[in-house]
Image (cartoon, rainbow, N blue to C red):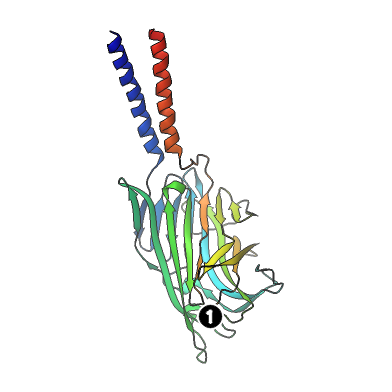
Amino acid sequence: MKGHTNTILALFALALMGMCIPLAAAQASGIQYQYSTGIATLETDQIQVKITGLGEVPHFQYWSPEVDTVDYHVMFVKLFEANDTDSDGVFTNGTDTMVGPPFALPTADWAFSGFYAEEVDGNVTAVHFNLTASDEFDPRPGGTGGAYGHLPDMDPFNVTIQLRVHIYVESSYELKFDVILSGWQWTSDDSILVMQFTVTQSAHGQNQGTSDPAGFYQESTKFKFGNGYMQYNDTALAAQNEIQVKASHRAGTGLEAGESIYLSFENFGNDTLVYDPTLGVEVSSTLPPDTNTLVIVGGVMAAIIIVAVLIKVRK
């Protein structure tokens, strides 16, 4: 009879362990993705993103399923060279001056590369794709940027910008994108290069941001708004050399809604620039990468304790 009891208890423990393992697997949901009519859509349990590049600026629209009443819109508007008047490495709107016309990103045609998905045991753990634009540009004073053309007595040069977009299950509340810039010809060795982004928000489901982002502020290298954020690194790479990146921001004026974020890069010569900002949402239930292991171990320990208690009672 005692042997039968031990067998039953062992089976009971195994059943409890089996219940824990599916629970652990449920924590690592996959990534859904698709591309249609110029819009790439990425979705996890914690963030949903639409990225538009066809015939307009790269437009990142994203929201948290936990707070599905508001969407955040981050748009990569333009590139421009600027005189750093006070030599602090930061673009100060109204003090530092733009050199020549900006490279206006709405003029570029963005080519979609197709998705590359990483899988583990049939589950999608990461998704990557590129948006690439190449255009003639004359940034010198008197020239005109992008596809707007250039003065006939000035020779333009070709600028290529590639956005490499990444989303990972292990950090399923954020989206990373690398900005790869090549072909930039500097007007002055003392200039800085500025990337301008705008941040707005809208009611959920609207295609354009219509109002200022709620509670916008900067904390170290992160701009926060509502439960969303944009984070930047304070260094970039050019020919494997680190260059300094600094940020500033300015609220829209008049009828212009939103906040502008200016990322300023020290002069990197003729090298290719590689930079990787991050967009994301703050979530209430962000689980650390090793949660699966903790759930399994916790389940096994619980099973052992229950079995020990039952054996003691049986005695």
Describe residue 271's horizontal placement relative to residue 17 as left or right: right
Q: Residue at x 48, y 82 (%)?
A: 157
Above/below status of 310 relative to 229 = above
Q: Label 1, secondary structure: give it.
A: loop
Residue furthest to the right: 86
Residue neighbourhood size for the residue with mark 1, other residues' Cα within 10 Å, grouped as few (<14), some (14–19), many (≥20)? some
For residue 251, say whether it is visible: no
Residue furthest to the bottom: 153
List the residue tagged with mark 1: 185
What residue type is disc 1 on? Gln
Q: Residue at x 46, y 48 (%)?
A: 171
Residue furthest to the front: 3
Residue 238 picture location, percent across and down: 52, 70
- Specify the quadrant of the image occupied by residue 84: bottom right
For residue 298, say whether it is visible: yes
Above/below status of 44 relative to 143 = above
How many labels were placed on the picture? 1
Describe residue 58's horizontal placement relative to residue 190 as left or right: left
The quarter of the picture where the N terminus appears is top left
Residue 251 picture location, percent across and down: 64, 61
The quarter of the picture where the C terminus appears is top left
Describe residue 2's horizontal placement relative to residue 56 as left or right: left
Residue 268 picture location, percent across and down: 56, 73
Closer to the camera in the image, 97 or 117: 117
Above/below status of 295 relative to 38 = above
Residue 147 picture location, percent across and down: 47, 79
